[in-house]
Image: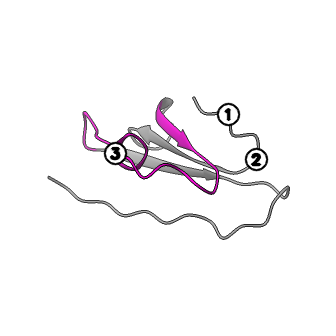
Amino acid sequence: MDNCPNDYVEVLEGSYGSTDSIKRLCGRNLPFTDEYRVVRLKGSSLLVHMHTDNANQNRGFAASHRGE
């Protein structure tokens, strides 16, 4: 899991209460590779959790999805 001490977005497989973390993303300049920007699920539920604190003031995050 990436070291994200302040703000991060965590992607979990499942619904509310899930603990099956797929990836945690943080920082301003994430690599533009499939490893970081594409999430593939085994099931049909995805939970996106945004954690934020008052250490930094940034703009948030953007996401999109596509079903296949």
**For residue 35, which quarter of the picture?**
top left
The location of residue 29, given as percent across then percent down, is 58, 55
Q: Which residue is mark 1?
A: 3
Colour treatment of the image: one colour
Name the amino acid, label 2.
Answer: Asn
| Residue depicted at 49% across the width and 66% down the height | 62
| Residue depicted at 44% across the width and 47% down the height | 47
**Distance of mark 3 from mark 1, alpha carbons?**
20 Å
**First along the sequence among labels 3 and 1:** 1
**Distance of mark 2 from mark 1, alpha carbons?**
9 Å
**For residue 52, which quarter of the picture?**
bottom right
Which mark is drawn over residue 34?
A: 3
| Residue depicted at 42% across the width and 52% down the height | 32
**Distance of mark 2 from mark 3, alpha carbons?**
24 Å
The residue range painted magenta reads: 21-44
Name the amino acid, label 1.
Answer: Asn
Q: Quick one: SS at disc 3?
A: helix
- Image: 17 above or below 28: above
Q: Residues within 10 Å of mark 2 (few under 14, many from 20)?
A: few
Which mark is drawn over residue 6?
A: 2
Tell us which disc is closer to us: 2 or 3.
Answer: 3
Q: Quick one: SS at disc 1?
A: loop
Residue 50 in the figure: left or right of residue 20 = right
Residue 9 in the figure: left or right of residue 41 = right
